[in-house]
Amino acid sequence: MSDLFSFWLKCRKVPAFQYEHRTVLITKNDATPHYMGTWRPITVGNLLLRLFTSILSRRIASEAPFNEIQHGFVPCDSITENVFLFARCLKEGSTQSDVTTIVLLDFARLCWT
């Protein structure tokens, strides 16, 4: 497997079929077929690609650690902190400083239940 990953690194390309994923919908409790909010999408990705990206991520993080203010794409559960930080930015806005803060959140797949 290490030979394969080394080959991908040397070529700087991962074969396209490694990016193929399959998404299925699993019903939540009290699911209704006509309301998508009662279904949970589960995506199964290629194991080799997940392993490869995990190894790369760990190696990069060990050489170039994330800044302490980095919240996205880090191996921790910080959604609650991010939501509170976003609310604080909205509330305080430009009243506390001359700096403008821009926050982008993707709520497309978020379920508040």
Image (cartoon, rainbow, N blue to C red):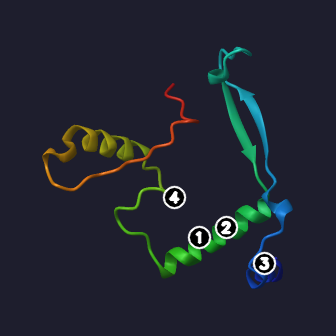
Neighbourhood count class around disc 1 (C-alpha, 10 Å): few under 14, some 14–19, many 20 upward:
some
Tell me where residue 79 sits by quadrant. Answer: top left
The amino acid on which the numbered mark 2 sits, given as a three-letter code, is Thr
The amino acid on which the numbered mark 1 sits, given as a three-letter code, is Ser
| Alpha carbon distance from label 3 to label 1 | 15 Å
Residue 2 picture location, percent across and down: 78, 80
| Alpha carbon distance from label 4 to label 3 | 23 Å
Residue 86 picture location, percent across and down: 33, 43
Mark 4 sits on what residue? 73
Q: Are marks 2 and 1 in contact (CB under 8 Å)?
A: yes
Q: Secondary structure at mark 2?
A: helix
Q: Nearer the viewer, residue 75 or 88?
A: 88
Question: In the image, which disc is placed on residue 53?
Answer: 2
Q: Secondary structure at mark 1?
A: helix
Residue 76 picture location, percent across and down: 47, 55
**The N terminus, quarter of image:** bottom right
| Alpha carbon distance from label 3 to label 2 | 11 Å
Q: Earlier in the sequence, mark 3 or mark 1?
A: 3
The residue positioned 70% from the left and 14% from the top of the image is: 32
The residue positioned 54% from the left and 34% from the top of the image is: 110
Q: Nearer the viewer, residue 30 or 110?
A: 110
